[in-house]
Amino acid sequence: MHNHSLLPGSVAAHEMRHVLAGYPTGLVLVAAELEGRVVGLSANSFTSVSLDPPLVSISFAHTSTSWPLLREAPRWGVSVLGEQQAHVLQELRLPADERFARLDMQVESGAAFVAGALARLTVELDTEVEAGDHALTLLRVLELHRDTEQRPLIFFGSGAHRLAR
């Protein structure tokens, strides 16, 4: 370990990204219907915060062009991606206005979900906190469902992977 990395402010963004790529997470699609079209993005910063009240969190980069649109929607859909949704990741790399053209999306009360997701959570924004170059959001869970037959996609080393069987 280098002693200089213990000094406040000495961790470079590329170092942070490299080290955290070694921490496996799940992958979600956060989406809503706004003025007749679906807006949204993928995230791996999704985490459970509280069971009572039911809260989850997601961090959004200030550089995201989808985040300002999404935050205008009263409800969002969080789709936890399973092995059957690996194709979704390629679509989400497209520009924001093309991202949902070929995806099978289901909209319920403004929240948008990818068809067949491993889990679905309908959420609304509870609290937003400025956190460096991201906005950290606490989201109140209104409804949820899980398909127990599916296995998750795992985000590790900057890419998506399947669990070993």
Image (cartoon, rainbow, N blue to C red):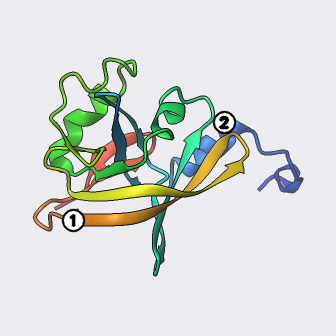
- Residue 14 numbered tag: 2
Query: Is residue 77 something that shows in the picture?
Result: yes
Closer to the camera in the image, 85 or 40: 40
Are the residues at dot 1 and dot 2 in contact (C-beta closer than 8 Å)?
no
The tally of labels here is 2
Q: Nearer the viewer, residue 82 or 115?
A: 115
Mark 2 burial class by Cα count in 10 Å: few <14, some 14-19, many 20+: few
**142 relative position to 83: left or right:** right
N-terminal label among 1 and 2: 2
Q: Judging from the image, what secondary structure is the residue with disc 1 in?
A: strand
Q: Is residue 138 above or below residue 73?
A: below
Residue lying at the far bottom of the rendered structure: 52
Dot 1: within a 10 Å radius of its alpha carbon, few (fewer than 14), some, or many (20 or more) residues? few
Q: Amino acid at mark 1?
A: His
Query: As rendered, which of 24 and 96 lies closer to the eye?
Result: 96
Rendered residue at 66%/36% (across/down) = 14
Horizontal and vertical percent for residue 93?
37, 25
Viewer can see residue 24: no
Q: Quadrant of the C terminus?
A: bottom left
Q: Position of residue 36 (x, y in %)?
A: 28, 28
**What amino acid is at disc 2?**
His
Give the x, y percent position of residue 9: 85, 46
Residue depicted at 27% across the width and 49% down the height: 109
Q: Is residue 24 left or right of residue 144?
A: right
Q: Residue at x 38, y 50 (%)?
A: 75
Q: Secondary structure at mark 2?
A: helix
The answer to whether 55 appears left or right of 93 in the picture is: right
- Which disc, if any, is residue 145? 1
Q: CA distance from mark 1 to mark 2?
A: 36 Å
